[in-house]
Image (cartoon, rainbow, N blue to C red):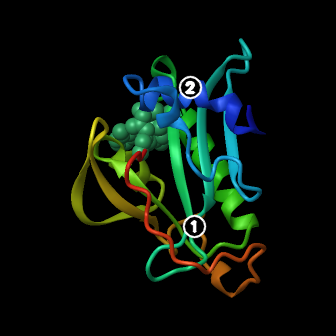
Amino acid sequence: MIKRVDAATIRPLRRAILRPTRPPEASIYRQDDDEMTVHLAAYDDATGELVGCVTVFPEPVDDEPRAWRLRGMAVAADLRGTGVGAALLAAAIEAVQSAGAPLLWCEAREAAEGFYEKHGFVGSGELFDVPVAGPHRHMRLNRSAPGSLLGLGSRRSSYSNGTRRDRDRDGLG
Ligand SMILES: CC(C)(COP(=O)(O)OP(=O)(O)OC[C@H]1O[C@@H](n2cnc3c(N)ncnc32)[C@H](O)[C@@H]1OP(=O)(O)O)[C@@H](O)C(=O)NCCC(=O)NCCS
């Protein structure tokens, strides 16, 4: 089951999977408590345990001020390969679509690139290194992929965030 939750609910899992050797503050994103930010949690239907999380929020890229970013995608190790990640990603894309955003992007860990590619993301540019987290690549959801954000550019956005901000590259994934 996928549920919308607050940041505090998913932070321990986010930290355990993505930043286990860093202090808890390293798992706080500056957009975590923004009104538009959507945190999604996956719960094991049998045990009710939190087993996965992802976060999406408005963050401009150079060529698209209304873009949204996906961060903090994580699935408990013992449940990987069972569809939890795919369900979270689909729900995240749906949330971004509902917000009327024309573009969804992420900085993907090299090891997870195949997961995003499978779901319509396309990588661009060189791999870049993130201390502790390793190599990452910029990826964007392909507008012509099935289930993509095709056509949403013409819809009125439900948020306005035209200011360019420097990409936050100190803690990705
Ligand atoms: C990446 C991650 C979120 C994927 O979640 P998951 O629950 O294992 O993914 P799913 O079981 O839903 O897999 C969906 C599909 O993607 C594929 N897939 C999953 N991880 C993959 C990977 N790393 N490379 C290539 N394909 C992958 C699966 O084989 C499956 O394909 P199928 O539909 O043909 O069966 C999970 O492995 C994870 O939490 N990894 C550690 C943290 C991490 O790297 N997060 C990403 C940060 S950018």
131 over 58 or under it: above or below: above
Mark 2 C-beta closer than 8 Å to ligand 1:
no
Query: Which residue in the protein does label 2 denote?
Result: 13
Q: Is residue 105 above or below residue 163?
A: above
Q: Quadrant of residue 46?
A: top right
Horizontal side of 59 relative to 121 (left or right) equals: right
Return the x and y of residue 64 as percentages of the image width and height.
52, 80
Relative depth, front residue between 6 and 141: 6
Crowdedness of circle 1 by 10 Å Cα count: few (<14), some, many (20+)? many
Q: Are marks 1 and 2 in contact (CB under 8 Å)?
A: no
Judge whether residue 114 can be spotted in this image.
Answer: yes
Q: Nearer the viewer, mark 1 or mark 2?
A: 2
Residue located beneath label 1 in the image: 148
Give the mark nearest the N terminus, 1 or 2. Answer: 2
Q: Residue at x 77, y 56 (%)?
A: 35
Left or right of 112 on screen, residue 41: right
Spot occupied by residue 41 in the image (x, y as percentages of width and height) = 68, 34
Q: Position of residue 21 (x, y in %)?
A: 37, 23
Question: Quarter holding the C terminus?
Answer: top left
Left/right of residue 14 with respect to residue 19 in the rendered view: right
- Separation of marks 1 and 2 at Cα, in angstroms: 27 Å
Height in image: 150 above or below 74?
below
> Split into 4 quadrants, where in the image is the N terminus?
top right
Residue shown at 74% from the left, 78% from the top:
157
Residue 122: image location, x then y, percent = 37, 64
Task: Say what amino acid the circle numbered 2 marks.
Answer: Leu
Give the image quarter of residue 138: bottom left
